[in-house]
Image (cartoon, rainbow, N blue to C red):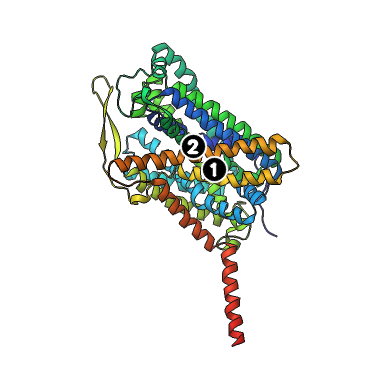
Amino acid sequence: MENKLTKKYGLITAICMVVGIVIGSGIFFKAQNILEATKGNVWFSVLAWAIGGIVMVICASQFAVMATKYSKVNGVVDYAEETCGSRYAYYVGWFATTIYYPAMTSVLAWVSARYFGELIGWNLAGPQVLALAGFFLIGSYVLNTFSPKIAGYFQVSTTVIKLIPLLLMAIVGVIAGFATGTLTDNFAGNVDIILDKVDPKSAGGPELFAGVCATAFAYEGWIIATSINSEIKNAKRNLPLALLLGSIIVVAIYILYNIGVAGGADVGTLIGKGATTAFTNIFGAVGGAILSLFVVISCLGTLNGLMVGCTRGMYSIATRNEGPKPEMFKQIDASTNMPTNSSIFGLLVCAIWLLYFYGANLNTANWTPIYDPITDKLIKYEIMNNGTPWFGLFSFDSSELPIITIYGMYIPMLVMWIIKEKDLGVFKRFVLPILAIVSCLFLVFVAVYAHGITPFLKAQAEGKFSFPVLFYLIIYAVIMGVGFLFSKDFKKIIKKKKNKVETLKTEE
């Protein structure tokens, strides 16, 4: 008798899975990026978080409705199959397994290692951090593969731990910010150093779009919770509740945390040194170090949640008799009740994407803040570490573009939902999915603008050529083309040609 995944997760674990996967590294290191993208305009920064949160809540609500009707093996693949058919579902599953899950997971492994390295003074772009990121990947794989129940407990505990620094900063940061006047000055745009990268009053629509795009990574992950819908007790009730409640909790915490951070340090320092500076300013060196350790644990919790999707990716494809060696990848280990072969494949692809992220993003020229040694005020930025990306024009930000792609892949599913689900009311059939479609289109637009149009115009002005979105799409097309070679469609073509050749031989 074939082994099957058992129901082992309840509502609380499912909510913690959503909150734990989404809240992780993004809120900490993307907060700095978003402030930089909005030129230090705190109002625009908070607005970017709010807009990104609205997009997540709308999409999560729509998929929560889908979860009440569809529940098989792997959430998003199931929804693609029910709405657009098995062929589309296969390519969604292939994309999630080879690009989406592993790209995000590899970035989380590096970010976890980065914050740990920051605590002990390592070079954040050095080989030590890369090696530790690999260790974290393997550790998360071992935990999820050989003890999924412990992995579930770890998810719940890290979710609680990661809320500590966020809630403390949200409350104490606001109080301290009003007391010192820092919060008022930051929101008013009163910064001591005015640079191209720190000029709140010059921010406009393009800066806001770039900020919204950066929130995509911080808000992403909720859909990965649907990858365990076949393992959630009473999934048609608990999964929708987990998606809706979890996403609302995340948005509220993110906005409050960012307001609190703005009360902990001036904008120039936050952009130059990162949000962890606010922890040290408010809670002191020891307290800041302890809260930074909580940040590391937070990132590891998110890594654990993302690894859940990675370990089940190839399994979800194989259960549909698709992809390479389906009989091998859909095997369930009798002792651990986990798809071990699928897990190994997921770890391998994560390792490849980790090397890509390092070579494409960490070996490039970057702006380094220079501070006055007496006042510790930001003086200027200098371009340091003038490295060359390993992959040339094919170097892109793997923490954001794959995420935007999956939002684009939601659109056909949402359109077919409107066409097929005739028994639903007006709100569930039309209003909610249309809002979700608009949200997805908006994210695709801001991604192309932030990663495509803007870099292209800047490079053109410098006499160079740079269009990361274009070269990302080329890599995407190649990987999806490889997926076609393992699809039923290609197998049918080969079989048809083989039969034709045999027929010709017989006639001869």
Extreme-bottom residue of the structure: 508
Going from N to C along the chain, the mark reached first, 1 or 2, is 2
Q: Nearer the viewer, residue 62 or 209?
A: 209
Closer to the eye: label 1 or 2: 1
Query: Which residue does the numbered mark 2 point to in the structure image?
Result: 216
Which residue is drawn at the image coordinates 38% and 16% (left, top)?
185
Amino acid type, mark 1: Tyr
Residue 349 shows up from this direction = yes
In this image, 361 relative to 242: left or right?
A: left
Q: Nearer the viewer, residue 158 or 201?
A: 201
Snapshot quadrant of residue 320: bottom right
**Are discs 1 and 2 less than 8 Å apart at CB?**
yes
Question: Which mark, residue 407?
Answer: 1
Q: Secondary structure at mark 1?
A: helix
Q: Position of residue 214 (x, y in %)?
A: 45, 35
Amino acid type, mark 2: Ala
Snapshot quadrant of residue 489: bottom right
Snapshot quadrant of residue 263: top left
469 shown above or below 443: below
In this image, 189 relative to 223: left or right?
A: left
Q: Position of residue 92 (x, y in %)?
A: 57, 51
Q: CA distance from mark 1 to mark 2?
A: 10 Å
Question: Which mark, residue 366?
Answer: none
Q: Secondary structure at mark 2?
A: helix
Quarter occupied by the C terminus:
bottom right
Q: Position of residue 221 (x, y in %)?
A: 54, 40
Which residue is drawn at the image coordinates 59% and 77% (left, top)?
500
